[in-house]
Every structure is written in C-alpha cells, then in structure tokens.
Amino acid sequence: MAAPNEFYQFSIISALMDGVASHGIPISSVLAHGDHGLGTFLQMNGEMIVLDGDVYQMKSDGTTTHIATPQDTITPFASVTRFQPTSTTRATVSSKQDLSALLTRLFPAAKNHFLAIRMDGVFKSVNVRTAGGQREPREKMPAVANRQTVHTFEAARGTIIGFRAPEYVMGINVAGDHMHFINEDRKSGGHILAFETEGDVDVKVAQLSKFHLDLPTEDDEFNEASLVGDAQGIHAVEG
Amino acid sequence: MAAPNEFYQFSIISALMDGVASHGIPISSVLAHGDHGLGTFLQMNGEMIVLDGDVYQMKSDGTTTHIATPQDTITPFASVTRFQPTSTTRATVSSKQDLSALLTRLFPAAKNHFLAIRMDGVFKSVNVRTAGGQREPREKMPAVANRQTVHTFEAARGTIIGFRAPEYVMGINVAGDHMHFINEDRKSGGHILAFETEGDVDVKVAQLSKFHLDLPTEDDEFNEASLVGDAQGIHAVEG
C-alpha cells in the first residue's frame, strides 16, 4: 500500500492544456497510490473525483457514474494521495477565498508544500462546471472548457475533495486550490467554481511533502506537445 | 534498492536560488534513491558529483574530497538516479551544444522526459566552475556564484555526470542539460561551463519518466522562501 500523505500524479496539467488526452493508464494504477483525489477521463470527458478509494465520473450531461472496474478505465491525468488528515476541524466557509485563508491559518508554514483537503457537510450553494470532452484528438483544454456545463447545487449535502499546490508546480499541476464536489447520493457534482457552506462543515487537511510524478510513456501526443506552461491559461480554466 | 532509471530529487533549485542551504538530509538518504547524480553541500560549499554510488565534494579551493561517511554529511539539494543506460555509444563531442544535439538524435521523442547522461574518456578541455559557498545564511545563489572559481582542465581523462530536464520543470530543477565533471584520479572537477572531447568518448544515456521530489520539512528557510522560479536567473548561474 502507498505511504500516507504523499502526492502522486500521472501526467501534467500542461499536457491537458495542449489537448493530450487520448491515452493514459488504468485508474487501478492510480488507486495503488491513493484513495483521495482528482482527475479526468479520456478525451477530458467529465470530472473525476476519488473518494475513500471509489472513483466517480461526473459528466457534462449531469449524470455521474461510479467506476466499478477501475482496471478497465483509462485516465490521461489524475492526482491522488492516501489521505490521513492531520488537522480535523469544523468551520463555516463563505467562499473559496475564505477556505484559502482558513487553510493558511491551519498550516501557516505550508505555502511551499502541498495540502490535501476534504470537506463534508451541507453546502448552501456549490457552483460547478463539468467538461464536455474533446470533439477531436488534441483539441486544447481552453476550447473544451468553452463548452463546459455549469450547474449550481443549493442546500446540498456532499463532499469536497481537493488539493492545494505550491506556486512552483504551476504547469505540472494547478498552483493554488483545486477542488471537485460530489453530492451525498453520489449522483451529481463537478469541478468547483464557487461554494458556500450552510453553517459548519467538517474540514480535514494534511500536508504533503513528497511528490511523485509518472510521465506518459510511448504516447506520441505527450512526446510532441509543447507543454510551455501557460500559467494564465491554466488559472482561467482550472482556477 | 531503488528502481532503475527513476529521477529522485531533494528540495528544488529555486530554493538554492533563494539561498536556502542551511539544512537538508543525510547524503545516505539520497543514495538510497540512486548511484549517479549531482548536488551541492551545506552553504552551497562546492559541487557534488555521485559516481557509481561514490560521492565527491569539489570545492572552490581546487580540492576534492571523497565523502566517506554519507550518513554524516548533509545535502540541501541533490538529484540522483539508479543509472542503467539504455543507449551506449562512442562519439566525438565538440561542445555542450553538440552534446545536446547528440542527445536529441539518440532520444528524439524524449523532449518532455528526463535523461541521465554519463561520458567517460579524454577531454581536450573542460571548463568548470565551483561554488565557494555562502558568506551568511540565505545569501542567494547569484551572489554566491559571483565568487565562484573557474578552472580549465586540458587533456583530462575523467567522467561527466549529468541530467537533461524538460522545460516544464524549470524552477524545480534546471531545464536543459546540467553536468558536473570529475577527473580520473577523483582529485578535481566542478560544474561544467564548456567542454570538448579528445576524439571519441563513451556516451551512456537513459530516459527517466518517473520523478520523485522530497521537499524539506521543518525547515523555516525553505518554508519562508519565495521560490518564484526565476528562469532567467537559473539559466545564468546553472546553465
């Protein structure tokens, strides 16, 4: 089993930006490294959330599928940790910015490290997007994002899973806070654009200071991509 | 033992740029991940080369020390692999640029991956620098580099150890080719600024597609550093 609270990632966010999403590895290979995380699917078809080792695909048509056979489902990009929270608290959080400030209060010396984040409870509102997928191979993420579906859940009980990554990994991952939501019945959710809790929710956090990156091999799309690291573009579609 | 041809790194190059060099881990911990690599020592006092699992400290006064007890010597930054070359050739190399072109010919699909490099033979000239160390804690690398010693070896038999890193890791490591030299009697060497072989030398290379990064923990210097990733500055002092 993977060591707890280490950050594992397959491929890099700049590859998705460049439209590299035709190949990847079985999700079961990702789950060998963790039970808590985020990612996407072939052709960027929806948002992945990994919750207690279960993987869900949240699609732009509003449906959510539990991935029952992760050995048969490929991901072109995913990041996970075997989550063992070292900080557990209850807090009312009014926005992403407010969560960001809370995380900094809880881990004041962690700006150059990774954090794994989980929140469980009732959310007054959660505004999410779900990527609709590429129309053709190598279609870039900003073009895919132009067709994303946006949805707002109100008074929704559910779970937020996410990571904070330090500034210096921008291009490899998304610098800052990056979170996905799934509701309690695991039937809907997406990539969080904004949220607000309904009173206190459970907030669990761990600092991650070991990073493992597996690069795609024998993948011409990856090998040929420019991967220039468009920080502004990444913030626009993933921020 | 570590898996072969994976890239392991402790701390990030932007931390050295910011002068974070007062703490670290025992070199023995680095050697658990590889037998071939580069690095530096506390206070950036000299250049580290890891050659067949042996570690040498090449100082600005021209002396070179074999680190006989790596468990007792701390490094603030190092990168290694357990090197198993997958390409072995003999070649005459006229410059760093010529080596760069050779590596690209040997591994045409590896621009977004890491390479580990080793060259053994006689070098017509090798121009090296050795860092003289910080005068005070947090003195930044560009200031340290202003006091570096530069030396040229001629008709020198020895070994070059190095890595190529992809553009998107700039700030975490040095994008491009980064190499150190040590002569055959292991008595002198340094960070390579320029070199030219005397006829053919042995060139051994492997592609590395798994990257492991351990961040310093409980290190206030690291936690407080800005780590902004000054690509131009890194190229100036490490290119």
Image (cartoon, coloured by chain):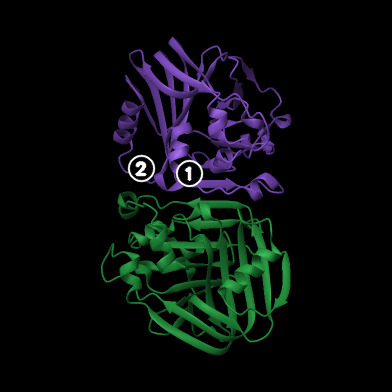
Chain colours: A green, B purple
Which sits in the foreground, A119 or B46?
Answer: B46
Q: Is residue B91 above or below residue B222?
A: above
The answer, for residue A52, to whether it is visible in the render is: no
Which residue occupies 50% across, 33% down? B83
Q: Closer to the observer: label 2 or label 1?
A: 1
Which sits in the foreground, B161 or B63?
Answer: B63
Task: Give the amino acid at mark 2.
Answer: Ala
Q: Residues within 10 Å of mark 1 (few under 14, many from 20)?
A: some
Q: Residues within 10 Å of mark 2 (few under 14, many from 20)?
A: many
Q: Is residue A225 left or right of residue A163?
A: left
How far apart in space, not on screen, are marks 2 and 1 (Cα)? Answer: 24 Å
Q: SS at mark 2?
A: loop
Write down the chain letter for disc 2: B
Tell me the tag on residue B110: 2
Q: SS at mark 1?
A: loop
Q: Is residue A198 left or right of residue B155?
A: right
Tell me the tag on residue B230: 1
Q: Quadrant of residue B163?
A: top left
Which sits in the foreground, B190 or A183?
Answer: B190
Residue B31 x, y percent position in the rendering: 62, 34
The mark that comes first in sequence, 2 or 1, is 2
Q: State which quarter of the image contains the N terminus of chain A.
A: bottom right
Task: Give the amino acid at mark 1.
Answer: Asp
Which residue occupies 68% across, 55% down? A109
Which residue occupies 67% across, 85% down? A199
Q: Do the residues at discs 2 and 1 belong to one chain?
A: yes
Residue B7 x, y percent position in the rendering: 51, 41
Residue B73 x, y percent position in the rendering: 70, 30
Which residue occupies 59% across, 79% down? A159
